[in-house]
Structures are given as structure tokens and as C-alpha cells.
Image (cartoon, coloured by chain):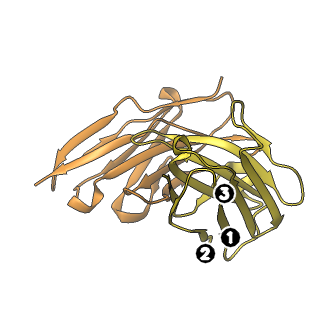
Chain colours: A yellow, B orange
Amino acid sequence: GAVVSQHPSWVICKSGTSVKIECRSLDFQATTMFWYRQFPKQSLMLMATSNEGSKATYEQGVEKDKFLINHASLTLSTLTVTSAHPEDSSFYICSAQNQQGANTGELFFGEGSRLTVL
Amino acid sequence: AQSVTQPDIHITVSEGASLELRCNYSYGATPYLFWYVQSPGQGLQLLLKYFSGDTLVQGIKGFEAEFKRSQSSFNLRKPSVHWSDAAEYFCAVGAGGFKTIFGAGTRLFVKA
């Protein structure tokens, strides 16, 4: 149980285009989902926290107009990188939290999405 | 402030040797503690977790970890490392309020 699926696993796009990454909880309802960015050989950097039906909460320094997050249902959150530029190239990971996790901090992670902007 | 420290950026062990990855945390209340493993180009997989009770917890893939409150530590151990264990390992503490704090990670190299 507690499977999180992230799609696409990798994407290459041209500079100036927008890219959407989906994160789905397959067998549980995710009250909260998180989006991270990971640079090579570094830890996870939390970008934003999203709760179903409400606006995402962005971490300091993360441009909310650049990284649009939508959490339309209890099983789906999307991250859209708008007008992508080469510096946005990175590994993006989502995680989801169920009701118990809201108390303990336990997270279930997607497989990650490698974005390369040419 | 809440924090997680993994003192070792990378560790190299021989296949078949024992392993211990260190993790220290700073948290005001009783912590919820986790170890995750990340293979290259993959997301994170939960190895084990500690919520309460027995301070020695067993996880998947033969890993275990021991919670020591007096030392604010939650070290990960494995008696015999396999080449497939080479990966990045993250210690994390559940800080409540939907927050999980991660350590910087320890990269494990396994030599034949």
C-alpha cells in the first residue's frame, strides 16, 4: 500500500515552453502533497506544500508564478514549470501524506521526474 | 530549531562488511524518525521508521536502526552489506504540522 506515482519520469523541452508533472497517490487519499527539487548530489529542497482544494504554500525563494501547483483532488497534484529555462533543469520529486502522516511526518514518495530544458 | 545531521557525506564499505550510518537530530518533543533510501534517478523509499515503543526497529532489506534518546541519535545499521545497497541514505524527523526535516544524506559506496 501507499504507492505514489509520478509522471513523466523524464522530460526534455525547449526553453520558453511549459511542462506539467503529475503526482498521484494510487491507493490512499493524500491530504497533503509536497514538491521537492533535488540538485545533483544534494538533499531534497522543499518547494511547496499543497492541500487539496486550497492554494499551495511556497517556501521562501520559490517563485509561485514559475512553479504552478494544483491539487484538485485527494489523489492528484500537478506541478507546472512555466516558461522553462535551462536553470530550471533538475530532478523534481513529489511526496504524499495520508491522515496518519499528518501527525507523524511519514511521507510516501514518487519516482521523481528529470526535467531537462534545452 | 529542529534539525537533522548526518555527519558523513559518504561512506565506503566492502561487500559483506557491516554498516552503520549516523544520524543525530534536534527536536524539542518526542520525534518521529525515518530512514529513506534513494537509488540514482529514483524517488525515496522508506526503509524503516520509529514512532514509539521498542527503540530497535527493523526495516526492509535487512536494515535496522536504534533510537537513543540520550544521544539524540537514530543510527542505521546492516550486518552485511550487499553491492545493491549502494545508494543515498536520508535520515528524517517528523516535526509535526505537516513538516518533515531531512538530513543532507549519506552516499554509500560498496566495493567488491
Asked whether residue B100 is in view, the answer is no
| Whether label 3 touches label 1, CB < 8 Å | no
- Residue drawn at x 54%, y 56% is A14
Task: Specify whether disc 3 shares its chain with disc 1.
Answer: yes
**Marked residue nearer the N-terminal end (2 or 3):** 2
User: Percent position (x, y) of residue B96?
Assistant: 73, 41
Residue A25's label in the rendered image is 1
Identify the subunit bearing mark 3: A
Q: Which mark is residue A1?
A: 2
Q: Chain of mark 1?
A: A
Q: Residue at x 44, y 35 (%)?
A: B23
Residue A18, label in figure: 3
Q: The N terminus of chain B lies in which quarter of the figure?
A: top right
Instruction: Tell me which residue sits at (66%, 57%) in the image.
Output: A18
| Amino acid type at mark 2 | Gly
| Gap between marks 2 and 1 measured at Cα | 10 Å
Q: Secondary structure at mark 3?
A: loop
Q: Quadrant of residue B81?
A: bottom left
Report, in whole angstroms, how far the alpha carbon at label 3 lies from the one at label 1: 23 Å
Q: Are marks 2 and 3 on the same chain?
A: yes
Chain letter of the residue beneath label 2 in the structure image: A
Question: Which of the marked residues, 3 or 1, is nearer the chain's N terminus?
Answer: 3
Q: Callout 2: helix, strand or loop?
A: loop
Residue A90, x across and y down, in percent: 50, 48
Q: Earlier in the sequence, mark 2 or mark 1?
A: 2
* Front residue (pair B100, A37): A37
Mark 2–mark 3 distance (CA, rounded to whole Å): 32 Å
Task: Residue at the far right: name it.
Answer: A53
Position of residue A48 measured from the top left corner of the image (x, y, whole percent)? 72, 45
Looking at the rendered structure, the kind of residue marked 3 is Ser
Q: Quadrant of residue A42?
A: top left
